[in-house]
Image (cartoon, rainbow, N blue to C red):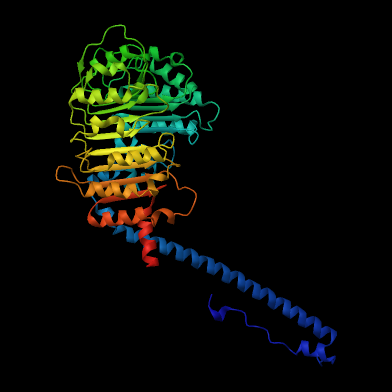
Amino acid sequence: MSPSELVEPLQPAWNVLESLRSGHKPPMATRSGIADRIVELETRQKEYEADITRLTQTILQRRAAIASTVAEIEQTKSLAAPIRALPREILLRIFSLIDVPRSAAMSPQNAPCSLGHVCRLWRTLSRSTPSLWSSIVLQCPETRFDGYSEDVLEQHLFLSNPRPLDIYVEYPASAESHEDQDQDVAILMATLSGHSARWRSLKIVGSEVVLKVFFRHLASGIHFKTLESLKVRGLFTSASDLGLHNVSLPTTLTSLDTNFAFDTFGKLPPHWPALISVSCPFSGPDSFFQFIVTARNLVSLCISSISNKEREVPMTPFVHDKLRRLTLDTRSITPVLDNISLPNLQELHLQSRGSSSQKQCPERICLLIQRSRCALKVLSLNCSLKLSDLIPILQLRSLVSLRVHLDDEFYVEAATSAFLDTLTVTSKKQLLPGLEELEISTNTVVDFLFTTDRLPAMILSRWNVPDNVTRLSSLTLSKEEYPDGPHLIYNTSALAFSLWDMEDKGLKVSWTMAGDDLLAEGREYARSMF
């Protein structure tokens, strides 16, 4: 609408307001003249309102036209976007880099579905890339296995064919799970069972109810042809009630991780040609020995516990020449280890989930390493064992990495001082002669380590070493949480200044508390103050 089309304002016939104020009646202010004037004004008001309505509609139309034009501009720019020039092979390669296991839950927001919403080309490419759909993730309480989830699952199974499937189901007992979770898992397993020939990895975390449903389906005649990794963990009162005795583990397994005793499963194959990684407890020495002699290609073994009962058959000395990484809970350091040699062992990790009554743990560990004559490279301690208990191991020149977690239950001030004394290099004491990497972590209580002057002295002794001792190249200090009190107690302490100095000399240093970088914070604070 042009300005000429607008209604012109009506000029007043006389000054009404002035007449009202003065009390004089104007010449035209007859009763009929006033009535005519009112009608004329009301008519003009309606014309103004009509103008406003037409102008408002015009503004809305122009705003819509602007939005449409902007969208077309962006779309036109997209035609020249570099990504549109990428060949399909490159796009498929980019799609394959998506961290599918973290984004493949039964949801319309998962990665495969989201890619299909970008454009027709991306939808075609994503639906023709089986690897994007080959991970099945069902987590409680985030996911309810309703009709929609069933449709999404069927879509994943159809579009992933013929790729192997990676399945992850999590219904932890501690979760605020919905009622019918056993029914959810039953529907899920019944659907997945028809594709068991494509299972590559299977991870189940759940309550006892969920595990019973899970093992019932595994024992219902499912034939594993490609299953390589199996991880099953959960809370239960009795493993025998879960139906594991009806489940047969396949020989295709390369990795097994479970908190059920190994021999609680059903028929076990005579040999494990593919198995390279195992984490589980053992019900006794016999079951452990039966396993270790049949898994000759095992590379990594984590034993959470071994029942300390007498063997029915005396154990003969056994050499396992493939094992590289051994993780032992102190409860699993039993006499069954006394006749085993591991000549190629490179990493030893000792941990404890509870107090151990095995007083001979340090001696057994040292004898195992000495008997194996291995070139141990990594030693990790997260238990009540002290460094001073493992002197024969600390004398190995092959040991290049030491990781220690100090717990307040075992490390009071005196014990921490003894720990630092063991690490300190002197002219008379040179333990850990090949040490290059040192990692020390503490829990929320241990503070003495970070306030004593013995820690900087120990670090300096590891830097200014004699010719026959390797210089420390990497130091990591960490604490789970900040203690009460200001952070500046730590990041501007004598230890911080000492670490800055060592860092400037070339030592790779990291010091964190609750994930915060204390050295970086301290340097910034020091710059602002000085």
- Whether residue 328 sits left or right of residue 234 in the image: it is left
Give the image location of residue 121, x and y in percent.
31, 46
Can the viewer see residue 15 in this picture?
A: yes
Give the image location of residue 162, x and y in percent.
28, 29
Residue beneath the point at 76% across and 78% down: 39
Can the viewer see residue 159 in this picture?
A: no
- Whether residue 333 sits left or right of residue 445 in the image: it is left
Give the image location of residue 227, x and y in percent.
30, 23
Q: Return the residue nearer the eye: 513 or 434.
A: 434
- Whether residue 373 sits left or right of residue 72 in the image: it is left
Location of the C terminus by quadrant is bottom left
Q: Quadrant of residue 251?
A: top left
Give the image location of residue 439, x and y in percent.
31, 42
Q: Return the residue nearer the eye: 210 or 8.
A: 210
Query: In this view, which residue lies farthest toward the top?
Result: 312
Query: In this view, which residue lies farthest toward the front?
Result: 428
Position of residue 154 relative to residue 334, above or below, is: below
Q: Quadrant of residue 113?
A: top left
Q: Return the residue nearer the eye: 68 or 136.
A: 136
Location of the N terminus by quadrant is bottom right
Q: Quadrant of residue 303?
A: top left
Total numbered circles: 0
